[in-house]
Image: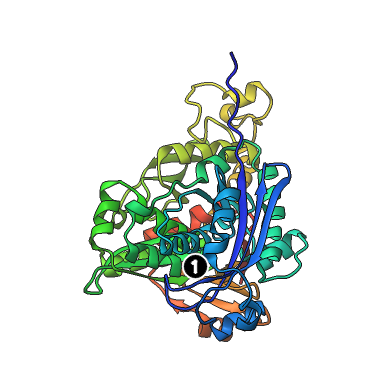
Amino acid sequence: MRKLKHIYIYAILDIETTGGKYNEEGITEIAIYRFDGHQVVDTFISLVNPEREIQPFVVNLTGINSNMLKSAPKFYEVAKRIVEITEDCIIVAHNSQFDYRILRTEFKRLGFTFKRKTLCTVELSQQLIPGQASYSLGKLTRALGIPVSDRHRANGDAMATVKLFKMLLAKDVEKNIIKDNVKQDISKRIKDTHRAIIDRLPSVTGVYYIHAENGDIIYIGKSKNIKHRINQHFTNTSKKSKKLQLHATSVTYEATGSELVALLKESEEIKRNKPIYNRALRRTIFTHALYSFKDSNGYINLKIDKTNNNDEKHITTFSNMQSAKSFMFKIVEHYSLCQKLTGLYPTKSNCFNYTIKSCEGACINEESPESYNERVNEFITKHSYDNKNMLIIDQGRDIDEKSVIYIENGVFKGLGFYNLNHQITNLKVLESIITPMQNNRDSKHIIQSYLRRNKRVKTIIL
């Protein structure tokens, strides 16, 4: 008998608050749409009298002031309706952690424990619609062509989240990401201090530093979503996570925009600070490399081998043998190279690709070494930046900014950020914005492997 799939019901909501100190905020407006995966089946929208002062910046942002809320119902008067409309639902919000915490806080003041599963459309968007300049609700919906009315009001933002969530459901073809991102209530497993840390962090790409009570850095990491990653550290049950949870009292971060910049900064910062819980990452981060040599017939051969600590003459490096082989199979196909001369098909005669007419016969001396080597050298030139002066341009921290990695004569010199209006190919301008960084085997591996994985990254040869 075929098992029926579980059908989720969602409570898609947005909350406006008074602002103020952590856990002292009150709700000023709430909008909830009960959504069955296809259509909205119930709606609740209401102003709420928070019985506390609204911060001036919130009044400017939302337009909601104390006079508007004098005759609005207090939270206890709408609490029953909120419980009913969210019953058996997964709460969905843009930064659900914030909205869910505010709801739980309000119910806690009434002596009631409010528990629901949650889904965050920021996290889902980052996975299902990668590469966006910003994941704030306003900028993301604008980029996706989703109409929004009444921005920064609960009803307008909740309806925009409904439209965004419909798009995300459609993009999640396998239905795995939605399922895997549903969060159980973790309030019992996470300290209030840790929850406060998470709430203050942004969902941006960058490097983060976990500090002990005395201020010492005990762990350094990088993430495409710092808030989400720290949440994982503070809720995970692994040995390392439990140690971090025991000693972590604060988290600082540096936004980078670019994952490549984050990887390079993480590597250098770990070497410089040697945090106690980064021991595994202090070791060399690659195990295999690609080498070239000429055989007795004059053909350039390519060979994957374990890295030799004393030898810098490799073309590129890999984290493991599997990723090296996977890359080489793609290269053989792309440049019409010989499986035998790339070490992928050990044989004394012709390679398999020659049999199916996709190798031109270098394996049996049918193609001339000059013709074959031309394609090998084209590959080597593309994937090695030895002796090159070049810039790697990637995402910046803001929409009008880019990051730049500077390589001079094959040596990684450093990185920086520039406004789109600047002409960075001028060396004096370039040198003024570049922060010098260490050139080492790890940084070379990080840059080469990132360029392999991200074909759209722009490179400029100087």
Tell me the element at label 1.
loop
- Which residue corresponds to the image point at 50% horizontal and 58% vertical from the top-left? 100
Measured as percent of width and height from the top left, residue 200 is found at: 44, 70
> Which residue occupies the foreground of this view, 60 or 218?
60
- Which residue corresponds to the image point at 30% horizontal and 46% vertical from the top-left? 238
> Which residue occupies the foreground of this view, 379 or 460?
460
Q: In the picture, residue 131 is in which quadrant?
A: bottom right
The residue indicated by pointer 1 is: 202
Q: Is residue 311 above or below residue 304?
A: below
- Which residue corresponds to the image point at 58% horizontal and 31% vertical from the top-left? 6
Quadrant including the N terminus: top right
Measured as percent of width and height from the top left, residue 197 is found at: 38, 67
Q: Is residue 198 above or below residue 287?
A: below
From the viewer's perspective, is 368 left or right of 280?
right
Q: Is residue 323 above or below residue 359?
A: below
Q: In the picture, residue 422 is in which quadrant?
A: bottom right
Measured as percent of width and height from the top left, residue 237 is found at: 31, 46
Measured as percent of width and height from the top left, residue 158 is found at: 66, 60
Residue 300 can be seen in this image? no
Q: Residues within 10 Å of mark 1 (few under 14, many from 20)?
A: some
Residue type for callout 1: Pro
As drawn, the residue found furthest toward the top would be 1
Quadrant including the C terminus: bottom right
Residue 192 can be seen in this image? yes
- Which residue corresponds to the image point at 49% horizontal and 22% vertical from the top-left? 348
Q: Is residue 72 above or below residue 12?
A: below
From the viewer's perspective, is 224 left or right of 189?
right
